Amino acid sequence: MHLRHEIAHVSHVELLTPAPEQSLWFFTEVMGLTENGSEGDSVYLRTWDDYEHHTLKLTAHTTSGIRRTGLRASSPEALDRLVKAIQDQDLGIGWQDGDPGIGPCFLFRDPDGHEMELYWENEWYEAPPGLVPALKNQAQAYPGRGVCVRRLDHVNYLSAEVEPNTSFITDVLGGRVTEQIRLDTGLISGGWTHFANKSYDLVYTRDWTGSNGRLHHIAFATDTREDILRAADIFLDKNVHIETGPHKHAIQQTFFLYVYEPGGNRIELCNPCARLILAPDWKTITWSESERAKGQAWGLKTIESFHTHGTPPV
Amino acid sequence: MHLRHEIAHVSHVELLTPAPEQSLWFFTEVMGLTENGSEGDSVYLRTWDDYEHHTLKLTAHTTSGIRRTGLRASSPEALDRLVKAIQDQDLGIGWQDGDPGIGPCFLFRDPDGHEMELYWENEWYEAPPGLVPALKNQAQAYPGRGVCVRRLDHVNYLSAEVEPNTSFITDVLGGRVTEQIRLDTGLISGGWTHFANKSYDLVYTRDWTGSNGRLHHIAFATDTREDILRAADIFLDKNVHIETGPHKHAIQQTFFLYVYEPGGNRIELCNPCARLILAPDWKTITWSESERAKGQAWGLKTIESFHTHGTPPV
Amino acid sequence: MHLRHEIAHVSHVELLTPAPEQSLWFFTEVMGLTENGSEGDSVYLRTWDDYEHHTLKLTAHTTSGIRRTGLRASSPEALDRLVKAIQDQDLGIGWQDGDPGIGPCFLFRDPDGHEMELYWENEWYEAPPGLVPALKNQAQAYPGRGVCVRRLDHVNYLSAEVEPNTSFITDVLGGRVTEQIRLDTGLISGGWTHFANKSYDLVYTRDWTGSNGRLHHIAFATDTREDILRAADIFLDKNVHIETGPHKHAIQQTFFLYVYEPGGNRIELCNPCARLILAPDWKTITWSESERAKGQAWGLKTIESFHTHGTPPV
Amino acid sequence: MHLRHEIAHVSHVELLTPAPEQSLWFFTEVMGLTENGSEGDSVYLRTWDDYEHHTLKLTAHTTSGIRRTGLRASSPEALDRLVKAIQDQDLGIGWQDGDPGIGPCFLFRDPDGHEMELYWENEWYEAPPGLVPALKNQAQAYPGRGVCVRRLDHVNYLSAEVEPNTSFITDVLGGRVTEQIRLDTGLISGGWTHFANKSYDLVYTRDWTGSNGRLHHIAFATDTREDILRAADIFLDKNVHIETGPHKHAIQQTFFLYVYEPGGNRIELCNPCARLILAPDWKTITWSESERAKGQAWGLKTIESFHTHGTPPV
């Protein structure tokens, strides 16, 4: 199955937090995102490499979790085709006005129930005085504050079943499964899908509680692995809970570090080194249970909470 | 102009060298490529992350330079469309059998005369015993020898005129100009084009000698900037001529190091950190003469030989 | 000449600035030092790895330059011996109370006139709430703000003559010259001296203006070379003047970056990788003019201002 | 207790291996050491930054373990004082000729029975053609092969009791305990001692088997943490057993990776970043059992085999 390049990239997420002040502190002071307006219970935050209005909409709520994921279409025509394809699956919710900087959005749900928005129109970010970068090919000045993540990298959902969702990504949205885990029973317990050269953009992991619409983690990319080692020291001294890492995943070979933000959502820092999927006919890599039992790339055992912690809590 | 995603990636190059033994030593022992067969005056070499048969065809010749660049189409249908579009421009040479591991190739020239081959069919590389990687999502074991570059990153051609060539890339091959230099006279003296998420794949720089078909450099990507700092020490102790760097380009923000391989061809090591062009409507960044006069990102002045050294020598 | 280990380390400096507010912004927001009290025209600042009260005393003044350098003796007995040896050279000024956290100091001048203080007694830094580190073997929490330098590394003085000063360091203070530059005329134009395992602590470079007591630069060590690459981006976007670098010195092999703080003083970021001088009988390395003409380790030419800019201006 | 600076540094070790060919492959091809002669059942190997003849004497033997550790005195006078002090403790074995490049050695044992040699005279290494470095302040050209460790960093012994040995280091050899572990029973189960600015050189860890003279690990320093991440990939693809890491120790804050060489000896790669102990009155840091229970710096639990695997096997 070839990529159809209908979706350009995962562009932003709305994250819910029952501890809005501490979560805001985490994303601005620790992670180094920049505030770009607020509205009602939500604050808009941006990574410095984002060309759009915001990367993260952080919303105060009774619980944690992900409310919505934004996907930008590759062209107006691609948007039309995608909307039709989603409607054909009866997964559409409908059109609505976008958040600041984002044009009309078509809302829909993946088969597991995660809400997504698809759009083409937007306004490119214009850095205000004080945030204008020295190099004109960059969206915003490098903040130099905290971890200073570069961009949103991927979203990893929990889902009651994996395959209906990865099939939706491939068949309806035009993506591809680059890697997956197949249990000895034949069940696919995890699937990594992508839309272009990044080796994954949206990931589905089996939710052993059988719940729907939950979040495993959202991930931000750093420029270097050293940024992640340095981040671990920052988390340590800022008293942010480190769940596991830094280490290198066997799957996708990403260098990673997982923490919990104060609202309870799992946040990954990731760095892929120079890994890209360039092959237009990439063959899905399937990992068996015994291969997974070897742990991560350099032998770290997968931490138990990785299989149990999701947001919101069940 | 949106990307058309007709070309998947720049896949390999044939490089000419008047010092074949020393060039082979350079690419295997210093750069860390792995030999994968030979044929006549040519040796096939691969970077460890390449899923195809070879990355570099190194050919003994009376002089230096680039003989051909390989481009893989995104699908068989894209190949058909591209061939027709090239033929419509009267730039086609014709079909011929590919080198080992590569299927039928359609040969053509860009307007400046650089020879290129376009193909779809290939054989995926199967690592022989001793080169089998520990992780199944990797093409070949990491050699751990010399610089150990990961993949071919881009080719930078010299051309008598820049614009006819970048227009060919965008209009005929479906790429896009991400950045360019416009002199005060209005002349475009450099254009960076790409086909997918990498911010550049094929670059054209004005050849002030007015010659055609020459090479400015080919570039290999390393996993980290630290790999490039380490490479500089390796080059120093292996007596490889360092032309300039390490430093960070203002254009494209790539961390770079330039050396001359023993055959005289300029070779770049590059690392983009996590930079990708995700915006489907990226607007070409145009740098003026005065902006270029500021030097590279952190102030290094562009070295004089950068404007004069190309291969083959005139 | 063996090391006598009479001096433990260079511990702090007093720096003068005619732009105190901007210099304070530079050292706190850009470099990531932490304020630890103020007194009159001076602010005390500390790097996070310093076990003493302060690393830098920043003092508003009519001009720039270094007012004093603090050296901690290796023991009370060493202090006594050093004071006597200095007095024997008629270079002593006398005892006075130390700044906050520092006990009685013996003031003196090196032959070129740079003021220094020598002491044993001090108070170990106790981090206040909010700055307490997670690991008890660390002085202060990692700030995660700006460049976040680890410690003061060395001071490089300008001096009318080099040799009388390096001889003072070796013969009177018990240090050793690890590397030096000898011009074709036989003149020593630069000398690097050290007191223990760091390969240099105090450096003397010939002041071609013939002035006395001036500063070439003070240097702060970062944990990694990546910290310096990252710092270059921070300086770029904070509009701090980068003079030269990042690159690797041939002499001492230090990875470096030089900037001017807003008061005009040259500040170096340096990282030695794992280089230490462990040999108790290290033989001074002498570089000739022609060796120096090759530039820095990887070929960067030494920038002209490196030979002309010192503080205060003449 | 102040440092007495009687010992300059830990200079070399003799390691025993029951798998000499594979161990030699490991140290040369994987670790990147350079062979410098052989004699009988032993091969001499050097790290590229070593100014002496060899860093490691690798000896074929019926079992694994460490046969001897070399310590270089700070001066001929220090050597005399040390020999006398050791003889006063009845721990001396006597003088013998040194191995190639090493002058007369005074042999002795620490209280636990580990054999050590103390010496002053040596020959400085002169690199043969092909290994001459480009920079004259470096011992040998950078090999650019495998991990390419810079120098021997420290030795960690197992000992039936810890305190008699660390007391020997401090009281007789003039070192100092920088950090230690005190169990709830009051027992010291680990002690880190140093001789100069490195924060540790010789470490004693309690041998729960009650055996004497065994080895926990020897450690080699890399220039960067990135070197260790890269090494992990090399080990993975070279099928070298990774025991634990990469991660950061809480004690001493060293970035680490542990592997077993083919002879069974545990080898550490370590990088201290820019950490040095500069304070002449450093106060020993004591870690309690509950503090240790938190795991390493970023939360990694100490692996069980760390408490059970030593060489030779019991």
Image (cartoon, coloured by chain):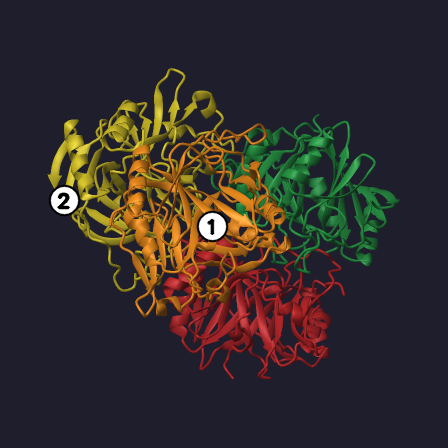
Chain colours: A green, B red, C orange, D yellow
Residue matched to label 2: D104
- The chain letter under disc 1 is C
Q: Seen in the image, is C181 located left or right of residue B138?
A: left
Q: Position of residue A301 (x, y in %)?
A: 50, 34
Q: Position of residue C305 (x, y in %)?
A: 50, 64
Q: Seen in the image, is B81 located left or right of residue B237?
A: right
Q: Position of residue A8 (x, y in %)?
A: 73, 54
Residue matched to label 1: C219
Under mark 2, the amino acid is Pro
Vertical arrangement, residue D7 with respect to residue D224, above or below: above
Under mark 1, the amino acid is Ala
Q: Residue at x 62, y 39 (%)?
A: A268
Q: In front here: A161 or B18?
A: B18
What's the distance in space between the residues labelled 2 and 1, CA to CA?
41 Å
- The chain letter under disc 2 is D
Q: In front here: C118 or C245?
A: C118
- Residue A54: in sight, yes or no? yes
- Answer yes or no: are tags 2 and 1 on the same subunit: no
Q: Position of residue B169 (x, y in %)?
A: 68, 71
Q: Residue furthest top?
A: D185
Say which quarter of the image contains residue C148. top right
Of the residues tagged 2 and 1, which is closer to the observer?
1
Say which quarter of the image contains residue C105. top left
